[in-house]
Image (tube, helix red, strand yellow):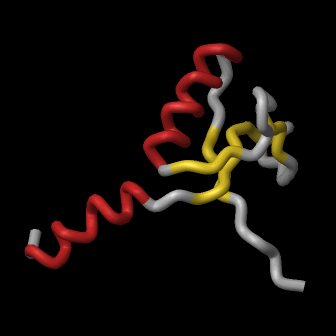
Amino acid sequence: MSAKQNSTVPKIASEEFSFCVGRPWEQGGTSICVYAYGDTVKHGTMAEAKNFRDYVNEQTGEKNFVYKLVQVPE
């Protein structure tokens, strides 16, 4: 890995974004069943999102995923 590539890894890992944790309502469906605990929408790093996802998986016994929230252009 070059010095330039190596220097970008911590920055990417520390970037914050809005996310929620949930699972599809039904297999192959397009609707998401969002896990609500405190705030439905969270804000943090990918590491925080994965930690919260792991917590949700332990609490629900189901496989949940991290969904990044982005603005939809009008």
Labels in figure, total: 0
User: Which residue: 16% across, 78% down?
Assistant: 4
Residue 65 on image: x %, y %: 63, 41
Q: Residue at x 27, y 63 (%)?
A: 9
Which quadrant of the structure image shows residue 59?
A: top right
In the foreground, 7 or 21: 7
Please state which of residues 23 and 46 is positioned toward the viewer in this rendering: 46
**Residue 69 horizontal/vertical position (percent):** 71, 60
Position of residue 22 in the picture relative to residue 66 (left or right)? right
Q: Residue furthest left?
A: 2
Q: Is residue 47 left or right of residue 58?
A: left
Q: Position of residue 66 (x, y in %)?
A: 61, 45
Q: Is residue 58 above or below residue 13?
A: above
Horizontal and vertical percent position of residue 46: 48, 49
Residue extending farthest to the bottom is 74
Location of residue 39 with respect to 56 vertically, above or below: below
In this view, the residue in front, 22 or 46, is: 46
Describe residue 39's horizontal placement relative to residue 15 as left or right: right
Relative to residue 14, is residue 61 drawn left or right?
right
Looking at this view, is 27 or 32 the one in front?
A: 32
**Split into 4 quadrants, where in the image is the N terminus?**
bottom left
Q: Residue furthest right?
A: 74
- Is 54 drawn above or below residue 23 in the view shown? above
Q: Residue at x 59, y 59 (%)?
A: 17
Instruction: Give the image quarter of residue 7.
Output: bottom left
Q: Quadrant of the C terminus?
A: bottom right
